Amino acid sequence: MHTTIFALLAVGAGACIALQASANASLRKNIGGDPFAAAYLSILGTLIVSTLAVLLLRPPVPVAASLRETPWWNWIGGPLGALIVLAGAALAARLGAAFFIALVVGGQLVCSLLLDHFALMGLSEQPVTAGRLLGAALVVAGVVCIKFL
């Protein structure tokens, strides 16, 4: 049962990515065409919501030693998120939401297969199999269909 709930939450997160890219592309257009300004304003909204959540929920403050001992690659999520927001603002209107998201999903899938296969970034090893490669190829075929059919 938990797997179904988690899967539905992941589908919802995927829908949020498509909505976010489309909203940021429209924001870029409405504020004069600058994708950096649109990305900044979008991330500012994230910062405001996150700050309000911390103030309301009051999660425990991490211990300084645990922050110092955290691997460097744990800190790249924020900058990578900013790049995703910027990409949505700059590219979704030019490529269309479906093609943009199909390409994003394709990139996510290829990167995820590599992360799993080599057990990178603290993940457990999930070897690349023929079935996983077939799944990735089907996603690539889906990208081609979205673009050309």
Image (cartoon, rainbow, N blue to C red):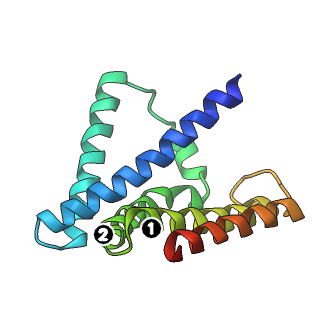
Residue 5 position, x and y percent, is: 62, 28
| Label 1 – label 2 distance at C-alpha | 9 Å
Which amino acid type is marked by label 1? Phe
- At x 19%, y 73%, the residue is 34
- At x 43%, y 27%, the residue is 59
Residue 113 position, x and y percent, is: 74, 63
Vertical order, 4 against 65 (above or below): above
Which amino acid type is marked by label 2? Ala
Callout 1 touching callout 2 (CB < 8 Å): no
Residue 90 position, x and y percent, is: 31, 72
Task: Give the mark nearest the N terminus, 1 or 2.
Answer: 2
Instruction: State whether residue 5 appears in this view.
Output: yes
- At x 57%, y 62%, the residue is 105
Vertical order, 50 against 105 (above or below): above
Q: Nearer the viewer, residue 50 or 97?
A: 97
111 horizontally vs 38: left or right: right
Instruction: State whether residue 129 appears in this view.
Output: no
Label 1, on which residue?
A: 100
Q: Quadrant of residue 120?
A: bottom right
Q: Quadrant of residue 128?
A: bottom right
**Mark number displayed over residue 38:** none
- Classify the position of the N terminus by image quarter: top right
107 horizontally vs 45: left or right: right
Looking at the rendered structure, the secondary structure element under dot 2 is helix
Label 2, on which residue?
A: 93
